Image (cartoon, helix red, strand yellow):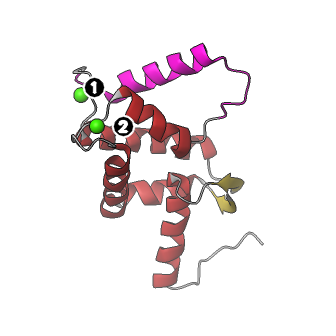
Amino acid sequence: MSVAILNGHTVMAFVEDGEAFGRCIDERFMILDVNGDGVLSRSELRKGFEGLLTIGMDSGYTDEEVAKLYDILFEKFDSDHNGSIDAEEFRSEMKEIMVAVAHGIGDSPVQVALESDSLLMKAVEHELANHNKGTKENHECSF
Ligand SMILES: [Ca+2]
Ligand SMILES: [Ca+2]
């Protein structure tokens, strides 16, 4: 875990950088596809999301409720309802999720604790990389 400062713009800039975001999502997809059959099963998705989004699973949900949550999540990803998630479905849904996250965070910088391989951490790293490439004139630093 490390602590980072980000706002909705950090996340959106990452999502809108189609190449960087797509590469990151594809990488994630391959990691999640444990048996290497090119699609994600229910259990592969669940396993991935337990680490990926660090949803607050200690917030009083029962196992049953959590299982239901992952079922809903799976149905959302599986947009053609064939019982598995292909790379295309994964990419478009991850994009929607990240856009929703960006809107949820809003314009004000928030301090968050992130797993080093979480997608939000990738967004922060993406922003830093872009800052280092360009001029630093408009670089606002919160501390
Ligand atoms: Ca698989
Ligand atoms: Ca599908």
Circle 1 is placed at which residue position? 79
Q: Secondary structure at mark 2?
A: helix
Identify the residue at horizontal 46%, vertical 32% (top origin). Answer: 46
Q: Are marks 2 and 1 in contact (CB under 8 Å)?
A: yes
* Image: magenta residue range: 56-80
Mark-to-mark CA distance, 2 and 1: 9 Å
From the viewer's side, name the closer residue of 12 and 83: 83
Residue 7 in the image, given as x and y percentages of width and height: 62, 55
Query: Which of the 4 image quadrants contains residue 18?
Result: bottom left
Q: Amino acid at mark 1?
A: Ser
Characterize the magenta stretch by its predominant secondary structure: helix
Residue 128 in the image, given as x and y percentages of width and height: 54, 73
Circle 2 is placed at which residue position? 93
Is 120 on the left-hand or right-hand side of 43? right
Give the position of the N terminus as an image quadrant.
bottom right
Identify the residue at horizontal 50%, vertical 53% (top origin). Answer: 119
Residue 135 in the image, given as x and y percentages of width and height: 51, 85
Q: Secondary structure at mark 1?
A: loop
Is 61 on the left-hand or right-hand side of 32? right
Q: Amino acid at mark 2?
A: Glu
Q: Is mark 2 within 8 Å of ligand 2?
A: no
